[in-house]
Amino acid sequence: MIWATILMAIREIRRNTMRSILTTLGIVIGVGSVIAMVTLGRGATAKITADIASMGTNLLIVMPGAERRGPTSGAASPLKLDDARAIEREVAAVSKVAPTSGRSALVVYGNKNYNTGVTGTTNEYFAVRGFTMALGQSFSDAQLQGGTPVCILGATVRKELFGPQDPIGATLRVGAVPCTVVGVLSSKGQSTFGSDQDDFIVMPLSAFHRRIAGNTDVNTIFVSAVSDKATTKAKEQISLLMRERRHLAAAQQDDFMVQDMKEISKTLGNVTGALTALLGAIAGVSLLVGGIGIMNIMLVSVTERTREIGLRLAIGARGSEVLLQFLIEAITLSTLGGAIGVLFGLGISLAATRALKLPFTVVPDIILIAFAFSATVGVAFGFLPARKASRLNPIAALRHE
Amino acid sequence: MSGPPLVELRDVTKVYGQGESEVRALAGANLRIDDGEFVAVMGASGSGKSTCLNVVGCLDQPTSGAYLFRGVDVGALDLDQLALLRKHYLGFVFQSYNLLARTTAVENVELPLIYRGVSASERRARAMQALSDVGLESRAKHTPAELSGGQQQRVAIARAIVTAPQMLLADEPTGNLDSARKVDIMNLLVDLNRTRKITIVMVTHEPDMAEYTTRTVLFKDGVVESDSKPGAEDRTVVRSGSDQSKGLP
Ligand SMILES: Nc1ncnc2c1ncn2[C@@H]1O[C@H](COP(=O)(O)OP(=O)(O)OP(=O)(O)O)[C@@H](O)[C@H]1O
Ligand SMILES: [Mg+2]
């Protein structure tokens, strides 16, 4: 009997092709969109978190200039190499300090030229920023102290100027300065904000000051705290030290900034959390719309279904047998729609995450929730009117209008 | 051995609506039908024939009065017991056919057999037989939308007889047929009544059709006005097939 009822339910599904397709479609769209949106949101969050982690969560960045410009403050005086040395010497919570200075320059090799950023710094920079050497070596002490015109290439610059060739030992011109390549950095790819982190070359700070900048200013000091937890303390201590070194009176605002990557990452985390919530809400709406679609189709066909139930009752079916058939029909359509919807949603999110270079992670709880919701809607609205009809007199059901 | 009659209606009323719009479709109908009878139910339009047939077919419940099916008070049965009664004893031809749309003739005819647990191959064979009984085997694969009114009516008849019920209730089964077809169908019904001992209650407007039956009941304003079997209340009928008195499930 069960088997016969299942067969009958399947035949009914095929008999009412349009109704079945529309019901299934409602569920597919509902489930699919929720899964796609939430998976994308989670992917973006994961990507941003990973990016920030790759920048180093115990990273602090010291820059000249007030965080919020008051009406009276003029241009802040630049940082100096001694500031970096003082931080390294006097702040206990700090493990590595990399003073940097930079500007953009045209780099020429053979008949190729390429516009990129030139950063003067020390070997600490690589550790603080999480770069490793892909080829060659970092700077020697002699090169760092003597201001030797050598450079290390970011992966993008290497590709642009040398292609597959070995760049080590080659001499290129940075602006007007001839410079020997001693190494190539490993690639870090795009930053969270979309900029290419490999598009630059590095020189010893002394060489940069002497040959390119013509001054001894430091733009930015990258500082690595001893641990993840020490960042807040390190930030406070650096601020105090810098106020002292820059002779700020108690009433004066800071004319420099100490940025904590962890705070930035928290802020970004909030933003992406909000983004995920927003996408989830949009998806929830489409789930609801899909649900209403299912509801509509079921209710539109309720008259025909009620009459059909009346007929089945009249020719000898029991209410429970008719109900079982309608239940199987509703469950079949809902599960089918749900399954297609899950595949559809995962397919879309896979394609979208590929296109946006985001990590693709399956979020099982959302799949479950979406599936359960549409299955409930499908079953409820397929089944409840049927249950009502199956309790009528056959004649009352047959006469339903 | 004479058990209770197959059908007994006692002062049955059926009231639709309330107050001003109240309609008394049945206003105290008394009727007794014994096994093996072939009854024609006649009467003006709106006189309560279909309503009476629905009550007898356990498709509808009377407002008051009692309906005894083989002595069992149908009013006391629950929905499932009524369904079993319909399944085991009754076949119904509706005035408006009530075929399933987008479903072929043979599938429509098979439908009652599904609920009787008949295997798929036997279902098909019996449905085809019933269709050929009504002269429609060549239209087995057509859906109701592709059939004429008379053809749909014959599919409805085939669906009612395919289960070989003890009692066949037919609401104007020849209403849409040409005279040749009418004769065919009436001969079929007479044959079912005589050889298969199926009790038949048939609503008709045509005295010609009533000729084929063994008894005519005339309805007027919801009551039985006349009955061609005088003294039907006395138990003088020759009872056929007391072997059918299986009792209720
Ligand atoms: N569901 C209903 N609601 C209200 N009134 C109804 C309903 N069904 C039947 N009636 C009324 O009950 C009366 C008897 O109807 P019924 O269908 O039994 O007539 P009938 O004798 O079969 O007529 P016909 O020969 O036209 O088929 C009619 O006046 C009809 O309007
Ligand atoms: Mg009628």
Image (tube, coloured by chain):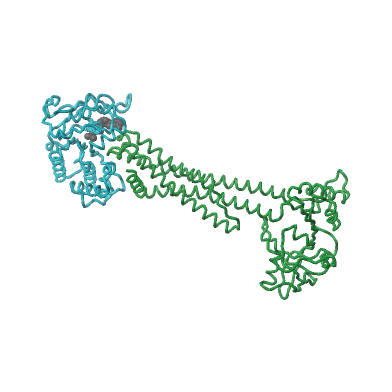
Chain colours: A green, B cyan
Give the quarter of the image for residue A214: bottom right
Residue at 23%, 38% in the rendered image: B91
Q: Nearer the viewer, residue A234 or A76?
A: A234
Residue at 71%, 55% in the rendered image: A55
Give the quarter of the image for residue B85: top left
Give the quarter of the image for residue A211: bottom right
Q: Quadrant of ligand 1?
A: top left
Q: Where, quadrant-wise, is the C terminus of chain A in this rendering?
A: top left
Residue A75, compared with residue B27, is above or below; it is below
Q: Nearer the viewer, residue B114 or B134?
A: B114
Q: Nearer the viewer, residue A85 or B99?
A: A85
Residue B117, compared with residue B78, is above or below; it is below
Q: Count up the numbered dots.
A: 0
Q: Nearer the viewer, residue A219 or A57?
A: A57
Left or right: where does residue A36 sit relative to residue B94? right
Left or right: where does residue A141 sit relative to residue B57? right
Q: Where, quadrant-wise, is the N terminus of chain A in this rendering?
A: top left
Left or right: where does residue A34 sit relative to residue B246? right
> Where in the figure is residue A39, as x and y percent of width and height?
56, 51
> Where in the figure is residue B8, as x and y percent of width and height?
20, 27
> Where in the figure is residue A155, as x and y percent of width and height?
69, 66
**Among all residues in the image, which is located at the extreme bottom?**
A110
> Where in the figure is residue A72, as x and y percent of width and height?
84, 48
Left or right: where does residue A232 sit relative to residue A247? left
Residue at 28%, 38% in the rendered image: A316
